[in-house]
Structure formats: structure tokens, C-alpha cells
Amino acid sequence: MDLRFSAEDDAFRATVRAWLDAQLGGEFRHLRGKGGPGHEHEHVEGRLAWERALGAAGWVGLGWPKAAGGRGLPLLHQVIFHEEYARAHGPGRIGHIGENLLAPTIAAMGTEAQQRRFLPAIARGEELWCQGYSEPGAGSDLAGVQTRAELRAGHWHLTGQKIWTSHAAISDWCFVVCRTDPRSARHAGLSYLLVPMRQPGITVRPIRQLTGTAEFCEVFFDGARCPEDHVVGAPGDGWRVAMATLTFERGASTLGQQIGFAAELEAILAAARANGADRDAGLRRRLADAWIGLQVMRWNALRMLAHGARGELPREALMSKLYWATWHRALGELAMDVLGPDAEIGAEIGAEIDPEAAAGGGGAYSLTPLQETFLFSRADTIYAGSNEIQKNIIATRALGLPRGT
């Protein structure tokens, strides 16, 4: 695994940095650092315009095959882009799910007609996607989904409910894992459907979170439809397609996520220096451990991506989600311990959240950035596969242990 940067890589980095600095110092300067996990309510219209600007400049689909409308850039160039994006405090990407999850899935497993229909719109930043996986009775256990679809007169008719659906309130489309064989159970009989969100028979309800924001939603399907040919893979092949999507989730954008983590750690260090918490030996050790953990995370991610570029999925990839989620939750707790008594100022236990004030980012209920880190990081070990599920995956797939009863 050679992770050294060449002169060509350095030139590409300079191009990326110059474009981002020009855009985020000009027309889109008000978006710098806005949005992202816990802040998805911020500047939605502006960030939609930003997605279109990225698409027009060719910064969407960097790793997609050229035949699928992407740029086919090598892994290191994708890493460079995401590192520079995070360094420039680029706004939270509203198009992340379509670009990094749905598009690679369609490029690898979709029909030519699906690729022609969906990939160009994603590349232009014009259509947003959400992910219809989790349900109230099937969160991390995707094989237990009960949302159903029945094929009638050339259309799939969907009935059921999805939950924790990011961006559902603003998305144009949703890729939905549902049961199309009513006699099936568990992994069998599932299909992967591409469903338009703006139609009768779909109700979206935002879920208010600890931070006062509502980026996750419930989605109810009551007779919603999609065309028969909007199934990726064959009907009943949804489990294989859904697992492929989760594999694509471990892409180069994880490096950008880690730079965001590094910025949070720097903010905690600054707070420790300011209030004298850095003189506490126990806190100094925990701060050092957090820094070491972030370096381990980075190098494991680079190793995982290098294997992925060769079409391999190393065992280390199976521990990625468990590692970063646990690390980030501990970082939030460390932030509160560094702040000490000040951690409770502005976030009184039992205080009633004013939804309008919270949506506006201030007013009667206001959180500091470190308080937001703490509260939102509590969800990291639950969404995208809970820690318990991740440990089961490591046990069975990496270590070869028998499944529990």
C-alpha cells in the first residue's frame, strides 16, 4: 500500500484547493462550515445551489466510472478532494447519499436505462436521494423489514414505514428495501426499488432530536408507486444489492469525516487550554488517547480504501463503523468533562426545547458547538448499524464464529 503523494497528486490538490477557496470565499462564503450531521437544517436552499455548482464544475462522481458519467479518478485523488473539502470547511453535502451510495450501486448493478436516467441528474446535483432501509421493527436488522411492494399493472405498490431516513423531507427519490414476496422471510424475497418521493401515498414526518434539529424522518408508504423497471437487480435480489450499497458507503468520503472529527478535537483542546483543564493529568491522557485514536482511524481507513481499490474487502473494513462511532461518542463525553460545570450552561436538564428557536439555531434554547458534539454523537453508535450489530458482523464474518441463537 503506497500512500505517498506524487507531483501529479500535489497539482490536483492545488486545483481543488484553489476552486474551493474561490467559491467559498465568494458566492458561497455564507455556507462555509454550515450543515452536516446535527446541522442539516442550516441553509438548505443555499446548499442545494452548492450541489449544483459542484456538479457543474465536475466535482460530483469523482470515482465513478467514466462510462457512468463520472471522472474515473484514482483513489488518491478522491482522498485529496475530500481532505481539501473538509480543510476548506465546505458545507455539509446534501447530495451525499445519492452520490456515494445510490450512484455506485446503479453503476455496478443497475440496467443501462437506469444508469442513463439517474446518474446524470445526480452528477449535476439536481436530484436528491434518501435511503429507505430501517423500520421501527427492523433497525439494524435489515433482514426483518416488513414494508411490502406488490406488482400490479406495471407498477410496484408500496405499503409500510421507514424510519431514521435522513433528508427525506427534501429528497426527490428514495431507494427502498422492501418485501416483494409475501411468503418469504428474512433475507429472501426482498427487492431494491427506486421510488419517487413527491407523489400521493407518501407521508414524511420529521423526528425531533436531542439537539433540537430534525434531520431524520419517518416515511409512511400507503399505496405509493414506482414503475416495474425501477428495481435494481432482479426482484428478490434486494439483499445482495443492499449489501453492495453498504460496501460503497465505506468510500473516500470517510477521510473528510475524520478531518471533521479532527476539527472537533482541536476545539476541545482549545477549550482545555482556555479553562486550565489541560493541567489535569487524567484529562491530558484522554486528550492524547483521542489524538492517537484519530490517527489509527485514518491509517486503517487508508488501508481499507487501498484494498477496496483492488476489489477486496479486508476484515479491517468490518470494524470501521464500530471504531469511529465508539471513538466519536467518547470524544463527546471528553468535551463535556473538559468544559466541567460550563457544560450544563444553556442546556439545562429537562429544559423544554423551543422547536422554532432550535430550527433557527438560537433563541430560547441554544447549544454551544461542543454541547452539540456531545448530544449528536450519542446517535453514532446506533444509526448505520448499532454497535451490537457491528460486533455480530465482526464475530461471524471476520472471525468465523457461529451465529448466536
Image (cartoon, grey):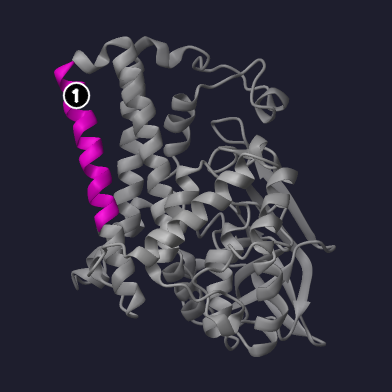
Q: Nearer the viewer, residue 217 or 338?
A: 338
Q: Which residues are magenta?
A: 280-299
For the point 70% across and 83% down, the residue is 116
Q: Judge the density around disc 1: few (<14), some (14-19), many (≥20) Cα neighbours within 10 Å.
A: some
Q: Position of residue 360 (x, y in %)?
A: 69, 27
For the point 47% across and 46% down, the residue is 86
Q: Quadrant of residue 330?
A: top left
Q: Quadrant of residue 181?
A: bottom right
Q: Nearer the viewer, residue 225 or 161?
A: 225
For the point 65% across and 59% down, the residue is 161
For the point 62% across and 39% down, the residue is 25
Q: Is residue 375 magenta?
A: no
In the picture, measured across the screen, residue 99 lies left or right of residue 253, that is right
In the picture, measured across the screen, residue 249 lies left or right of residue 306, that is right
Q: Quadrant of the C terminus?
A: bottom left
Q: Which residue is mark 1?
A: 284
Amino acid type assigned to the residue bearing label 1 in the image: Arg
Q: Position of residue 96 (x, y in %)?
A: 57, 58
